[in-house]
């Protein structure tokens, strides 16, 4: 059941309060016994313990910023994809983007090029871009059109192929496997300050483009014939929205690896808590995506102070039951 629009300000206020409360709480998560007092002193420039200040500035804050940006990017990407395909089970990973980006990074690892933030972003974008190009090409050849449901189906199939190629490379190169193993699990532990400018620019650019494309996407949701009737070009809209999904997903995967279930669960929560209308749905997906990833990352740090658990573990505990429930609801409806 969707909440009526008159409850929207209340829902928005509650989510924003939860988001603001989660920020200082996330800075206290970890194995260094940093409490809210040290965080408060750091925020007010009262010079807490030098070691605590160093940990907050160099480790905790970049990790928190990355969680905010990555969660927003994946939430928006999932929202766009579910509205584009009109399929509530869609998520960015099903387009093959996650596996394509992973393959690009593995190729960078075994190449003579240095594994720097710039090269990692470029490799992730090239890999995800080639994956999307393969999906569009195969769909065009197989069906003669670029239908959204066909893109989703062939994307899932090609994602399996890209994953198999990645696994084969890692089996043949033990060094690459050791270097990228933790990243493949989807983790924020290896984040550093050098990646933040790139991630910030790409995420903000992708979200801005997403809002620009809200109106054309809304026209496409009415049907291709209706969209053509008002002067829109369905194919161009499909390609542009897919490119925005590529930007948002590849930038997140390049930094944190394939973090699952954000793009699947968050759009449903945003639709329930905020609005079915596309602008509110997209903004709610960005906000809830950030909040959910912050809570998941802080939760696994509190469970394991040695930081060996990726946030995907906590997200799977939410995402898998949600996925099963969504499938059951679809079958009941049919």
Image (spheres, grey):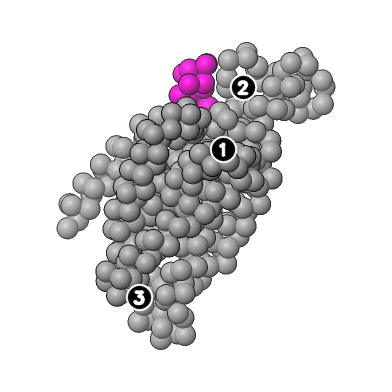
Return the x and y of residue 302 as percentages of the image width and height. 51, 19
Q: Residue at x 58, y 63 (%)?
A: 209
Q: Secondary structure at mark 2?
A: loop
Kindly indicate the quadrant of the structure image that contains residue 66: top right
* As drawn, 194 above or below 153: above
- Where does the image place residue 316, in percent across and percent down from the top left? 36, 34
Where disc 1 sits, the SS reads helix
As measured in the structure, the alpha-carbon distance from the residue carrying label 2 to the one carrying label 1 is 15 Å
Q: Nearer the viewer, residue 301 or 105?
A: 105
**Marks 3 and 2, the one that precedes in the sequence:** 2
Q: Is residue 289 visible?
A: no
Front of the two marks 2 and 1: 1
Disc number lying in front (3 or 1): 1
Residue in the picture at 52% in, 21% down: 307
- Tell me the magenta residue range: 297-309
Q: Between residues 333 and 12, which one lies in front from this camera angle?
A: 333
Residue at numbered disc 1? 67
C-alpha separation, residue under disc 3 versus residue under disc 1: 36 Å
User: As rendered, which of 329 and 108 lies closer to the eye?
Assistant: 108
Looking at the image, tell me whether mark 2 or mark 1 is earlier in sequence order.
Answer: 2
- Left or right of 25 in this view: 276: left
* Left or right side of 89 for 334: left
- Tell me the residue at 57%/22% (across/down): 29
In-image side of 86 versus 246 (left or right): left
Q: Circle 2 sits on which residue? A: 28
Q: Is residue 332 above or below residue 182?
A: below
Q: Residue 255 falls in which quadrant of the image?
A: top right
Which residue is tagged 3?
A: 223
Quadrant in the picture for the C terminus? bottom left
- In this orientation, does residue 199 appear? yes
* Labelled pair 3, 1 in contact (Cβ < 8 Å): no
């Amino acid at each position: 059941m969707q909440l009526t629009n008159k409850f929207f300000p209340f829902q928005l206020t509650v989510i924003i309060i939860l988001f603001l409360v989660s920020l200082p709480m996330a800075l206290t998560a970890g194995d260094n016994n940093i409490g809210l007092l040290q965080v408060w002193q750091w925020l007010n420039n009262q010079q807490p313990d030098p070691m605590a200040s160093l940990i907050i500035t160099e480790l905790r804050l970049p990790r928190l910023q990355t969680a905010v940006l990555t969660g927003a990017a994946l939430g928006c990407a999932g929202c766009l994809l579910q509205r584009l395909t009109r399929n509530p089970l869609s998520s960015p990973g099903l387009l093959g983007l996650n596996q394509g980006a992973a393959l690009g990074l593995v190729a960078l690892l075994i190449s003579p090029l240095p594994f720097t933030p710039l090269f990692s972003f470029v490799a992730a974008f090239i890999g995800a871009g080639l994956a999307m190009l393969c999906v569009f090409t195969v769909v065009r050849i197989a069906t003669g059109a670029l239908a959204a449901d066909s893109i989703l189906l062939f994307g899932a199939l090609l994602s399996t192929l890209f994953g198999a190629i990645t696994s084969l490379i890692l089996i043949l190169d033990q060094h690459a496997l050791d270097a990228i193993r933790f990243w493949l699990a989807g983790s924020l532990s290896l984040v550093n300050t050098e990646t933040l400018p790139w991630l910030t620019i790409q995420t903000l650019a992708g979200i801005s483009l997403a809002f620009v494309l809200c109106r054309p996407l809304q026209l496409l949701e009415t049907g291709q014939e209706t969209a053509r009737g008002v002067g829109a070009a369905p194919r161009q809209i499909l390609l542009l929205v897919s490119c925005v999904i590529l930007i948002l997903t590849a930038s997140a995967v390049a930094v944190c690896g394939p973090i699952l279930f954000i793009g699947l669960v968050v759009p449903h929560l945003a639709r329930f808590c905020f609005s079915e209308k596309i602008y509110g749905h997209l903004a709610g997906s960005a906000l809830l995506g950030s909040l959910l990833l912050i809570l998941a990352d802080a939760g696994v740090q509190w469970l394991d102070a040695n930081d060996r658990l990726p946030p995907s573990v906590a997200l799977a505990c939410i995402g898998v039951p949600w996925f099963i429930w969504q499938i059951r609801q679809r079958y009941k409806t049919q």
